[in-house]
Image (cartoon, rainbow, N blue to C red):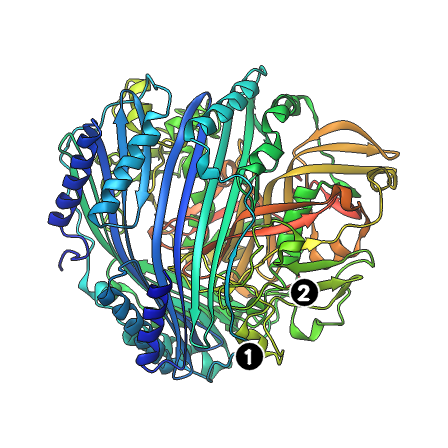
């Protein structure tokens, strides 16, 4: 294991020195500098062939100035001395044009930030040829079965640093690998996806086999009527749906009265089998252990036994409320405040197979798609099932069904949970990656059926 | 910038690429926002970088960098070729491109008032006035306003000899009033959701929108929604305002006609399309009144999809998509046009910045205006619902089944607007919906809306698209399913 060489600490200090020098020449001593460098490569396939294959390398610096109770930000991807001087001047110039904000806090003081190690040579060393070979092997799972595969294999390495003129210096490097695959038959499809900081932990062949099995197992989908069903949501479906609510676990959103938790904290909102934490230090999590102002992230008990216990506080929201910041603030200035980003939902001890066996009549859902909020306070979400929706009859999978549209309140869903599997790191397309279980719930509301 | 492009192109060709193109992009942006009487995100950004796309061994490779030193450019070109050669490990057939001419052109979009000539404090002063006006209304619990500006210069160079230098200016502005009461959060936006209106214009767009004048009405409606009746469930005639109809076009026509989706390129993410090749020239997509075009030319209007050349050097074009209700055209690229036997791309390849490859993206996909007056659009229904301003949107991955929610609605009785209704939604199947189109208002009511947040591709790219529409009536639409 090694640290990224894309943005060494010494380079961060050199850039910060140039920013502070440029600021001092403008008569400004309070500056915060966020900087990052990353490289991202993605091999994409469809119709059993690689059709898009890309790599991108880039960096940025983002300078925030504080001048007499005012603040603003300027960004550039040019890291030469003249560009650094200019972006600093831009930040100061637009800061000075603003009205004084009496609630604006001074820059954050340095605080010890627990180290997390999520940089893996297995991912950083990924090459176009190694990704192409993995893709070829996945295609070879589908093609002999007369199935068609599409998907991606990506590898990313990134370094993020945050420094300010009060001596704060937070630094974090991470690698991330992703593999996802959709396997299609003539009238059916299956999907699987996983992500990991360590590419060696990704089993792309197993994912390909799972997607292919779902495609083969859902041929000739029958049309079932819309209505309320007992549903078994696989982890990716759980995260994409439940993930829509965590922006509301924000002290600023509650103060703005745009959160569904407005007036609902410290009371039982969900079933007593629902407990959710935010924990950046969890072994299956990813992301920097500090927030947009450099405050170390604390572990939060968001929901305990169905009761909303804690929400996230940025420095500013915490100052207003007279509590400690939790380390979940977005870079300033912003309108949103903060949000938990490292969700860990407590699991149970029921396997998906046991959930199926205990279901007389219901649906197994692999994946959800195009999820959007219908009602912000009842937290009704709409969306579609996709790529592997199965009927369960008499405790057994009875074949594929046409995809449904749902309109489902998350408050109701999390009050109707009957069983949970062990929690795993899951990856979808509608919310950020989380550690979540599969879930069996009753009365899930499917309102329409589509044509496939 | 032209020298950078030429150097990168030379480096790719020197390494054996059979085709190469390079885009060097210099972008400047400003975003100014307020919330409840205070400045919010106030920021400026600049970005410069290049992307090299090559064909080698019949396969694509692409590499992008912001290291514009000679070594950085050589490295990017070498990586693009290395990636293309690796793609050969899982190749079925060589990529072929529909022929295209070479062009040497400089072009800039019209911009009457350079938005960067207006100071940030002037931006904030206007937004804070709007904010104050919104919060003057009792019951408004949250007011948000914003403006955004960008100027993007792109130099495109390709190995067939094109050198195209384009500059585009984009402006956006709008505001939202929220009202929380009891167990409801209601909102109203002006002139549209998604940050308001966005067009290929300078600061003149902000002046044209007359934002401040509309703030009292929007604030009043946000609060009044709490007292409104719930939108009924059932099957009714539906009249949509032009902004919601713009998004309806985007989701149920614009995405399905992307030929890369049809051919499977997006199967793992954005999905595919019900518009399989056998439907071209045969499918009754809509009623006889429905005419949809995909048009990137300036003469169509200052849309987010207006340009002179697309991102693989093909001139902007206007293409019929639905003619008198019949499905007659896809959006194509040089590769997909060749794949289906077309002689030429119709110029819809667009990339989200220098770091991403061009994909088939909507340019301006618009419903042509009809012949009816607004009174005739409304007057043709005994009992219907009129909906304004999108609140939620969702459609399946083949673009059949959709559901939209709007911020506000009014009941229509005997052709007249009646009581206000809250939480309106409607749903349907794309082709059934467009075949139910009974009336389209004329050109005096036609607006070219900007959708700034269209997602597609892996890694995901966000693109601005244009959609022109005028208020229209649809018969026998399922209303209210979201709140069943």
Q: Write down the residue under mark 2.
A: B319
Q: Is residue B414 left or right of residue A328?
A: right
Quadrant in which the C terminus of chain B is drawn = top right
Mark earlier in primary sequence (2, 1)? 1
Q: Is residue A44 left or right of residue A287?
A: right
Figure check: B274 above or below A174: below
Residue A76: image x %, image y %?
Answer: 31, 46
Q: Can see residue A279?
A: no
| Residue at figure coordinates x 69%, y 46% from the top left | B245
* Label number found at residue A248: none
Residue B451: image x %, image y %?
Answer: 57, 47
Residue A218: image x %, image y %?
Answer: 55, 68
A346 or B216: nearer the viewer: B216
Helix, strand, or loop for circle 2? strand
Q: Is residue B215 left or right of residue A347?
A: right
Of tags 2 and 1, the one toward the viewer is 1
Numbered disc 1: what chain? B
Q: Write down the residue under mark 1.
A: B99
Residue neighbourhood size for the residue with mark 1, other residues' Cα within 10 Å, grouped as few (<14), some (14–19), many (≥20): some
| Residue at figure coordinates x 27%, y 35% from the top left | A89
Q: Distance between the residues labelled 2 and 1?
A: 18 Å
Q: Residue furthest left?
A: A10
B276 or A381: nearer the viewer: B276
Figure check: A62 above or below B281: above
Residue B478: image x %, image y %?
Answer: 74, 46
Quadrant in which the N terminus of chain B is drawn = bottom left
């Amino acid at each position: 294991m090694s640290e990224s060489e894309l943005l060494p600490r010494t380079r961060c200090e050199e850039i910060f020195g140039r920013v502070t020098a440029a600021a001092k020449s403008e008569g400004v001593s309070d500056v915060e500098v966020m900087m990052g460098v990353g490289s991202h490569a993605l091999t994409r396939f469809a119709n059993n062939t690689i059709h898009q294959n890309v790599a991108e390398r880039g960096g940025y610096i983002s300078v925030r100035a504080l001048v007499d109770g005012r603040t603003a930000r300027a960004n550039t991807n040019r890291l030469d001395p003249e560009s650094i001087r200019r972006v600093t001047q831009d930040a100061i110039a637009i800061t000075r044009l603003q009205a004084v904000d009496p609630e604006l806090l001074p820059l954050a003081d340095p605080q010890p930030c627990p180290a997390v190690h999520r940089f893996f040579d297995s991912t950083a060393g990924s090459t176009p040829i190694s990704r192409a070979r993995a893709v070829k092997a996945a295609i070879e799972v589908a093609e002999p079965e007369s199935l068609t595969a599409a998907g991606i294999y990506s590898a990313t390495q990134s370094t993020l640093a945050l420094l300010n003129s009060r001596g704060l210096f937070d630094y974090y490097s991470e690698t991330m690998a992703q593999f996802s695959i959709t396997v299609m038959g003539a009238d059916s499809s299956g999907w699987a996806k996983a992500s990991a900081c360590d590419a060696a932990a990704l089993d792309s062949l197993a994912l390909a086999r799972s997607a292919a099995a779902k495609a083969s197992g859902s041929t000739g989908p029958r049309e079932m009527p819309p209505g309320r069903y007992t549903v078994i949501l696989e982890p990716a479906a759980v995260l994409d749906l439940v993930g829509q609510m965590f922006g509301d676990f924000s002290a600023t959103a509650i103060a703005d009265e745009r959160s569904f938790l407005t007036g609902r904290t410290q009371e039982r909102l969900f079933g007593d089998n629902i407990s959710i934490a935010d924990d950046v230090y969890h072994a299956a999590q990813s992301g920097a252990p500090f927030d947009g102002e450099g405050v170390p992230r604390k572990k939060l008990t968001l929901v305990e036994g169905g009761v909303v216990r804690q929400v996230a506080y940025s420095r500013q929201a915490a100052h207003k409320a007279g509590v400690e910041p939790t380390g979940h603030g977005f870079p300033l200035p912003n309108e949103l405040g903060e949000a938990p980003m490292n969700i860990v939902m407590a699991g149970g001890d029921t396997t998906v197979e046991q959930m199926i066996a205990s279901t007389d009549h219901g649906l197994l859902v692999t994946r959800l798609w195009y999820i959007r909020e219908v009602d912000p306070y009842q937290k009704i979400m709409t969306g579609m099932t996709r790529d592997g929706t199965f009927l369960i009859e008499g405790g057994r999978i009875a074949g594929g069904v046409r995809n449904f549209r749902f309109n489902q309140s998350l408050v109701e869903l999390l009050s109707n949970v009957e069983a949970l599997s062990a929690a795993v790191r899951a990856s979808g397309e509608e919310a950020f990656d989380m550690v979540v279980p599969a879930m069996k719930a009753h009365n899930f509301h499917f309102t329409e059926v589509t044509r496939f | 910038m032209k020298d950078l492009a030429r150097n990168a192109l030379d480096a790719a060709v020197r390494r054996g690429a059979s085709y190469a193109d390079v885009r060097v992009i210099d972008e400047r942006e400003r975003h100014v926002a307020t919330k409840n009487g205070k400045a919010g995100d106030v920021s400026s950004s600049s970005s410069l970088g290049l992307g090299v796309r090559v064909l080698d061994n019949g396969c694509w490779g692409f590499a992008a960098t912001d290291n514009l030193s000679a070594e950085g450019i050589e490295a990017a070109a070498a990586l693009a070729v290395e990636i293309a050669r690796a793609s050969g490990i899982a190749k079925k057939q060589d990529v072929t491109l529909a022929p295209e001419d070479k062009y040497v052109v400089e072009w800039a979009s019209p911009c009457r008032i350079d938005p960067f000539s207006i100071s940030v404090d002037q931006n904030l002063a206007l937004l804070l006035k709007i904010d104050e006006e919104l919060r003057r209304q009792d019951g408004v619990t949250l007011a948000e306003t914003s403006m955004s500006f960008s100027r993007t210069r792109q130099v495109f160079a390709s190995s067939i000899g094109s050198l195209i230098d384009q500059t585009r200016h984009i402006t956006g502005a709008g505001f939202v009033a929220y009202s929380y009461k009891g167990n409801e959060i209601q909102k109203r936006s002006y002139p549209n959701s998604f940050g308001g209106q966005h067009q290929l214009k300078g600061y003149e767009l902000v002046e044209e929108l007359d934002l401040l004048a509309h703030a009292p009405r929007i604030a009043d409606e946000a609060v009044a929604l709490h007292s409104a009746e719930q939108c009924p469930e059932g099957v009714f005639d539906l009249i949509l305002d032009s902004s919601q109809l713009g998004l309806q076009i985007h989701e149920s026509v614009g995405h399905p006609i992307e030929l890369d989706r049809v051919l499977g390129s997006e199967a793992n993410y954005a999905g595919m399309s019900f518009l399989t090749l056998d439907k071209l020239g045969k499918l009754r997509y809509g009623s006889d009144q429905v005419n949809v075009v995909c048009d990137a030319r300036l003469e169509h209007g200052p849309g987010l999809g207006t340009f002179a050349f697309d991102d693989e050097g093909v001139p902007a074009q206007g293409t019929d998509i639905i003619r008198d209700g019949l499905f007659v055209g896809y959006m194509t690229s040089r590769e997909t046009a060749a794949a289906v036997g077309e002689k030429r791309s119709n110029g819809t390849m667009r990339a989200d910045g220098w770091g991403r490859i061009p994909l088939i993206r909507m340019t301006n996909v618009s419903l042509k205006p009809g012949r009816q007056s607004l009174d005739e659009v409304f007057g043709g229904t005994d009992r219907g619902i009129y909906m304004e301003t999108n609140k939620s949107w969702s459609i399946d991955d083949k673009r059949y089944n959709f559901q939209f929610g709007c911020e506000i609605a009014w009941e229509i009785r005997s052709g007249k607007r009646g009581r206000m209704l809250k939480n309106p939604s409607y749903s349907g199947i794309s082709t059934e919906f467009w075949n139910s189109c009974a009336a389209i208002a004329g050109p005096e009511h036609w607006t070219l809306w900007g959708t700034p947040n269209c997602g597609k591709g892996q890694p995901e790219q966000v693109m601005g698209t244009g959609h022109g529409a005028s208020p229209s009536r649809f018969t026998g639409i399922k209303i209210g399913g979201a709140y069943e």
